[in-house]
């Protein structure tokens, strides 16, 4: 492979090549930096990037390898980190001028885990303001007039543009699945509590998730395996066996998976083209797919809104008190609403989560995964907003694992994401089902 | 021992005697029932008691022992269960006419654990209305004109009156420590999350604890060891090693324990007599005790109130909606206040708990346990209220283990409780320190 194209290697292949001595981490980082120099003026994925710092990490990892030290699973492979995830060697500014220049005292747990696995922390990717609505500077790599989606805008765009093979983001509503779909990469939101959130900007304990971006399911699994674990800083993590994401995702399902097509609670927002594309996909899947009606016992979008607004108001209390004039109007309005939520309504919404999971559990007796659009359509034109998260809301509320697969395309040439959702803690099987579906789609298409 | 006095046996001795075949469970239950017949007209500790049902359990356990089946640690020993803890074979009415005649589908986790340990579930003990303010019928066994304390009134009184050696209660503010102190028995509130609350009336996830009553620390430890564990129904329990309560409580401390006398956030309510009694106790302990100033970063009583009111409003939402006219006025007023708490204030209070624990952690570098009164004085006269819980509030809020020791007496002849508090998950060591203190107090007094 031409050394200038190394940036397009998958993380899995790059890690193997580095381990085998076929390439150095420095060469890989050089290629990624060259690609960034080329594409960043259009894409603007990075909030902070110090090429020399990235190269220093790479050279140190190369030295260690040459001295015979054991190489971690991501030895020498660069990862982009959403700028709400703490790093001690780079600022973490959370997309708000209120946190400008902030350098955390500790790495986020996932960043520490990535360093442990040998990764190069490439830089900090652009987030919307406090991972909420107000967009950052990033544009869609497929068409700079369109939004990349948000709030993990830079992570999705950087992976799509070939700047890094892997990136971390977050999801409190649709902040991983949506930008992955809009940018045409794989985006994975694991089960709530599986990946620790210590050292990540907290918006909502109930809803926050770490999100993963890559250009293949194999890479999603590889990245995922490094960051699953118990964390004293995250009260929703538990000591438990690490799910074998890589091995399971690579394996064949023992039986052909059954998928359930679900319209979801915001279906009326779907665009014509997306509806038709999914009808075609359903047809091509034949008996592997059945239509499912969701047993929704109430207004799940409203419950999510109540939780998110109330918890964001508490978690951004200090920002409100000290600098609300420096917040965007949408965020200020959200915090105002959140501050007015009664504790009773908040607790009622919290109590819905286990009940809703119980109500949906039966679905997974009939199907291996739910299939539904990742968004109402392709990335909207314009950079003033990041698109509609409502096709992700229910799954985020339930803490179920979800993955966006870049399997289709809109008439405008922009990617159209297929979302697969599995039962809680069915992460490894969901990746396997996703691999199977990708194989089916490629087989059908070619 | 005269068979009619078996009811005064400790649980530890009774279990041993039954295991050895020296007495039968039936004999023990007969003695307890005789004592109940004698004292119940004055004390009124029981909400539900079916002597035949208790005897049937005893005979079955005796049969099993005679057939050589292995005997559990509480084989044949009776335990009283507060009537907010679910039992499938007896009603659980929660002290409110709204739940009259309610028979749960499942045993509470702690009841199932007790049955597993071979205990006889003796009956259901009187609780205040929904374990809150409005008193039940129970009177103080030392003087029927005085309150037994609450909300675990019946459990404390039944153990004090020699009706059962062991009982379970609960504590959301001072509902175990206070009645134990007023009735002159040992009352123990383990670390939050150590004893599962599945199947217990939920008032507040943050504040609810299971409470334990016995007439010795040895018995508290024996009871405690049976009910510690992980419970899927209680999201605050964790799979963890069972602390060796019995062995540790029975052991000698490697060094003389150091105690810290703390006035606590409600000290201005203490009565003269109690203040003097504690000054004397402090003097007698000499260098083993030091005065400590609490580093309290705010109004902890208000934080507790906010949490309790907001969570009770959510957890008793249905009772409010369906039958608020059947609630007492104090409970109705509390729920009204709770329904008006803003989610922001509620979450702020919740977020105080870990910070408060951090602030107090340093104290336990200097001392093994905090020593403080269990209540502002002895049991108040009158049956219209159950006394002041405010000497327990801080420790309940922090989820720290606390034990009330019946070491002193007021001028009115009523018991005066000494409260010891340990660091979270220092339960076994707290029991050992308590044993040491009991030994000191007895040595000094005799």
Image (cartoon, coloured by chain):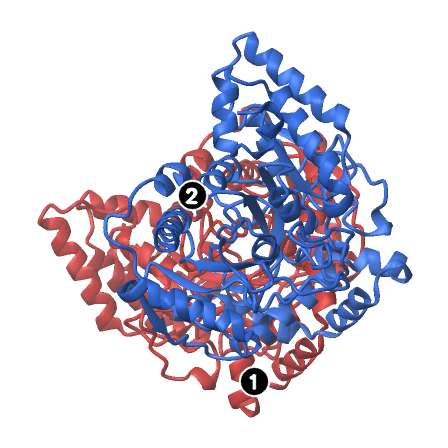
Chain colours: A blue, B red
Residue B305: x and y in percent read 69, 67
Q: Between residue A220 and residue A240, name the one nearer to us.
A: A220
Report the disc number at residue B218: 2
Residue A48: x and y in percent read 77, 38
Position above or below: B341 against B212: below
Please give the residue where the numbered disc 1 appears in the rendered image: B320
In the rendered structure, which disc, 1 or 2, sits on the residue that comes first in sequence?
A: 2
Position above or below: A174 against B292: below
**In this picture, residue A53 sits left or right of residue A275:** right
Residue A381: x and y in percent read 70, 64
Q: Specify the subunit that label 1 lies on.
A: B
Q: Between residue A113 and residue B298, name the one nearer to us.
A: A113
Q: Classify 10 Å Cα crowding around label 1: few (below 14), some (14-19), many (20 and above).
A: some
Residue at image point 80% right, 36% down: A103
Q: Residue furthest left?
A: B67
Residue A74 in view: yes
């Amino acid at each position: 492979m031409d050394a200038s194209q190394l940036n397009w290697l998958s993380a899995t292949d790059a890690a193997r090549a580095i381990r085998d001595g076929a390439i150095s981490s420095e060469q890989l980082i050089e290629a990624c930096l060259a690609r960034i120099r080329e594409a960043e003026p259009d894409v603007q994925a990075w909030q902070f990037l110090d090429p020399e710092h990235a190269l220093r990490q790479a050279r140190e990892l190369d030295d260690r390898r040459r001295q015979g030290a054991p190489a971690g699973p991501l030895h020498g492979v660069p990862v982009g980190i959403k700028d709400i995830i703490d790093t001690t060697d780079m600022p973490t500014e959370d997309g708000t001028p209120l946190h400008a220049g902030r350098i955390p005292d500790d790495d986020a747990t996932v960043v520490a885990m990535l360093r442990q696995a040998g990764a190069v922390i490439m830089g900090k990717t652009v987030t919307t303001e406090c991972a909420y609505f107000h967009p950052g500077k990033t544009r869609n790599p497929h068409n700079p007039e369109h939004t990349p989606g948000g709030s993990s805008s830079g992570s999705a765009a950087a992976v799509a543009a070939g700047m890094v093979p892997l990136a971390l983001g977050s999801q409190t509503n649709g902040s991983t699945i949506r930008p992955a779909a809009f940018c045409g990469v794989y985006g994975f939101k694991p089960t709530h509590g599986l990946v620790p959130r210590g050292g990540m900007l907290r918006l909502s304990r109930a809803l926050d998730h770490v999100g993963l971006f890559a250009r293949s399911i194999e890479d999603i699994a590889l990245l995922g395996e490094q960051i699953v674990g118990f964390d004293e800083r995250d009260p929703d993590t538990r000591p438990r066996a690490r799910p074998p994401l890589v091995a399971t995702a690579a394996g064949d399902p023992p039986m052909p998976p059954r998928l359930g097509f679900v319209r979801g609670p915001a279906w009326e927002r779907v665009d014509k083209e997306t509806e038709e594309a999914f009808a075609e996909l359903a047809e091509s899947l034949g008996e592997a797919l059945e239509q499912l009606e969701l047993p929704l016992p109430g207004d799940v979008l409203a419950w999510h809104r109540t939780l998110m607004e109330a918890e964001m108001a508490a978690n951004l209390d200090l920002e409100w008190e000290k600098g609300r004039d420096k917040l965007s109007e949408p965020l200020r309005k959200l915090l105002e609403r959140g501050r007015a939520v009664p504790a009773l309504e908040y607790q009622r919404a919290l109590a819905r989560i286990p009940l809703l999971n119980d109500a949906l559990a039966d679905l997974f007796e009939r199907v291996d995964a739910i299939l539904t659009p990742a968004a109402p359509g392709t990335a909207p034109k314009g950079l003033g907003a990041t698109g509609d998260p409502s096709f992700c809301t229910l799954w985020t509320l339930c803490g179920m694992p979800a993955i966006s697969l870049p399997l289709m395309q809109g008439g405008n040439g922009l990617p159209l994401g297929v979302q697969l959702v599995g039962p809680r803690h069915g992460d490894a099987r969901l990746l396997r089902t996703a691999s199977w579906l990708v194989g089916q789609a490629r087989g059908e298409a070619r």
